[in-house]
Image (spheres, rainbow, N blue to C red):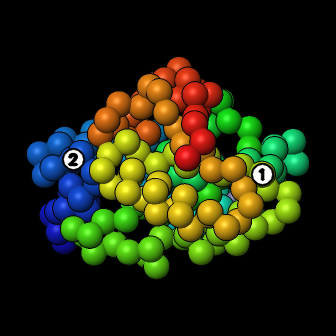
Amino acid sequence: MGEDALDRVIQLVARLPGLGPRSARRAVLFLLKRRESLMLPLATALSDAANLVRNCAICGNLDATDPCAVCRDVKRDGAVICVVEDVADLWALERAMAFSGRYHVLGGTLSALDGRGPEDLDIAGLVARAKAPAVGEIVIATSATVEGQTTAHYIADRLADCGVKVSRLAQGVPIGGELDYLDDGTLAAALKARRTM
Ligand SMILES: [Zn+2]
């Protein structure tokens, strides 16, 4: 019984990105040695987050409230919406403190290889938001990968009739670069140097 419970935790932890069975065993042993100070608080925090955190119905961000804190913040500029692939990219831009508008999380990129089409991403929601009179600019901040570029061009086409300016992150984002891995300064520079599509 005890061994089964341990195996199960190790197997689950091994499924996290960047971890394999070996690092999972080390992590679980680390936790077991700090049962009161780390393992039990972590178990409670995980359970709370799993029960409370939801996708924001407006932008797709993850938060314990819906709408999320970014969408509820009246001090943010509602005229500019920054389009990102994933919540991790939204959080990276927030960490860089380079953007004070709103966001829209697509939920991935278009990918013929993985069979992801427009209907698998929240593009319809973005088009609807772009048509609001208060919105003047859409900044497309997808990665500089082939799939990110393809997605950016597809979105720019879809937004062509919405009466908004469409721009794209430019300098500083290396080819093949994913947003979440950029340092804050590079991200801020890329956002400032965005160009009209
Ligand atoms: Zn939101």
Label 1 sits on a secondary structure element that is: loop
Give the residue number, with chain letter if any, for mark 1: 136
Residue 99: image quadrant is top right
Q: Position of residue 158 (x, y in %)?
A: 56, 68
Residue 91: image quadrant is top right
Give the residue number, with chain letter if any, for mark 2: 19
Q: Residue furthest left?
A: 22
Ligand 1's quadrant is bottom right
Q: Residue furthest bottom?
A: 119
At 70% across and 72% down in the image, what residue appears? Answer: 128
Closer to us: 187 or 144: 144
Left or right position of 165 against 79: left
Q: Amino acid at mark 1?
A: Gly
In this view, 41 is above or below 190: below
Point out the frontmost of discs 1 and 2: 1
At 72% across and 56% down in the image, what residue appears? Answer: 164
For residue 33, say whether it is visible: no
Q: Position of residue 176 (x, y in %)?
A: 29, 39
Q: Is mark 1 within 8 Å of ligand 1?
A: no
For residue 156, say whether it is visible: yes
Q: Is mark 2 within 8 Å of ligand 1?
A: no
Q: Amino acid at mark 2?
A: Leu
Packing grade of label 2 (10 A; few <14, some 14-19, many >=20) is few
Proximity of marks 1 and 2: CB atoms separated by less than 8 Å: no
In this view, 186 is above or below 47: above
At 58% across and 34% down in the image, what residue appears? Answer: 194
Locate the N terminus and report the quarter of the image it occupies: bottom left
Label 2 sits on a secondary structure element that is: loop
Q: Position of residue 64 (x, y in %)?
A: 67, 60
